[in-house]
Image (tube, rainbow, N blue to C red):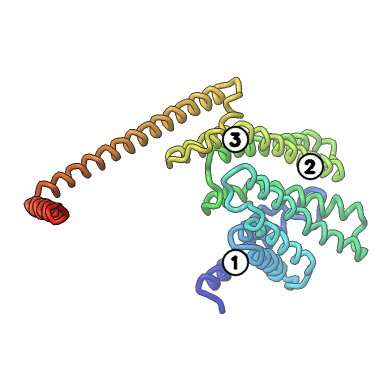
Amino acid sequence: MWSKKSFTTAGVCIAVGCVYGFANFLSGKYYLPGCNFAELRPQVVLPMFMGVLYGPVAGFVCGALGDMLGYTIGGKGPFFALHWSMANGLMGLIPGLARYVGARPVDAIAPFVRLLILLVLASGVPFAFSTGVEYGLGRVPFHEALFGFFLPIFITDTLWAFMLVPPMMRAAGLLISRIEMRTIQAVYYLLIVTVMATWLSSILITMREEIQVEELYTLGAVTLIVLIIGLAVSAVSSKKITAPVVTLTNVAHRVGEGDYSHVAELRTIGSRPDELGTMATVFSDMVRSVEKREEDLRQEVRTLRVRIDRKKQTADLEKITGSDYFKTLKQKAGNLRRRAGAEDS
């Protein structure tokens, strides 16, 4: 039985799917250069984001429903290109796997890389399938399927996803701005802007020469590959830069909670010849000093507690032996001993 939350989620997905469908109808008038089917459509991030936000089913419904609605508004009917609508659904479903592969929430470099991999797969796999259907049915030759369908869609959808999905996740609280994320994102957007500017500049420079569609999208594919390689290198570099800081922070938190057992993790950082190595060494020495002082203090407390206990025992004993009742008992016990001795004699 559906809960109120489920109905709310379904309503949001349907509403966003309608927005996606209307946006598809509008973008249907603007095709990519050299294409008569592939469109320039930044709205592809909507089903992707719905998938990340609510899960695979929500992403699929938003993408498939939106695409079918776009065809319906355009007068072609909801089943005009069912395999393309299914591809749009899969485009939303794949990012919906984020919660199952550790890519949600994004609070470090590793989850961020997993998210980007899902976005690349979402931009490529579904449309490789739908393009393959077009080619398999004999509707288009292989050359047109590759350069007129798949590559234009794959390149542009990937770039839109890379640019827009992370900010949308941040707005939804699914991307946490920690030092790792701030470092990687600074390089991330710089790379995207640089690579896109290079690609667009090449297009503008060669426009006078009427660049061939093969050259345009081959260049785009190479540009995308360079971007992905650059992001991979920047992820590794950023991890090396931020990992010591993260380790220091985690150890500091544990020390603050009284756990000194993780200080040994700083040995590797302490061997570095830079400022981070110096910081790790100084912090390790400081923690050891604090730990020793705490242990000495505990020992003093234990010793003091023993002394206090002994004094208390002595005071209690004196209080008991000094009472009139105890003195009377002591006198009676002495009389009994004397009588017993007289009788024995």
Using residue 229 as the reference point, say whether residue 331 is left or right of it. Answer: left
Q: Which residue appears farthest toward the front when viewing the image?
A: 345
Q: Residues within 10 Å of mark 1 (few under 14, many from 20)?
A: many
From the image, tell me which residue sits under label 1.
13
In depth, the one of 146 and 172 nearer the eye is 172
Q: Residues within 10 Å of mark 2 (few under 14, many from 20)?
A: many
- Where does residue 261 sit, x and y in percent of width and height? 51, 38
Q: Which residue is mark 2?
A: 220
Lower position in the chain sequence, tag 3 or tag 1: 1
Under mark 3, the amino acid is Ala
Q: Nearer the viewer, mark 2 or mark 3?
A: 3
Q: Name the quadrant containing residue 73.
A: bottom right
Position of the N terminus by quadrant = bottom right
Q: In the image, is residue 99 above or below residue 262?
A: below
Residue 270 at x, y percent in the picture: 57, 26
Which numbered dot is residue 243? Answer: 3
Give the class, few, some or many, for how many residues have Cα within 10 Å of label 3's Cα (few <14, many ≥20): some
Query: CA gap, disc 1 to disc 2?
Result: 32 Å
Label 2 vs label 3: CA separation?
34 Å
Q: Secondary structure at mark 2?
A: helix
Q: CA distance from mark 3 to mark 1?
A: 38 Å
Res. 196 in view:
no
Q: Amino acid at mark 2?
A: Gly
Task: Say whether disc 2 or disc 3 marks the residue closer to the N-terminus.
Answer: 2
Could you say which is closer to the camera, residue 224 or residue 245? 245
Regarding residue 201, the answer to whether it shows in the image is yes
Tell which tag, 1 or 2, sits nearer the viewer: 1
Most foreground residue, 231 or 255: 255
Q: How many marks?
A: 3
- The structure residue drawn at horizontal position 12% and vertical position 53%, both measured from the top left corner, is 342
Side of 97 relative to 141 (left or right): left
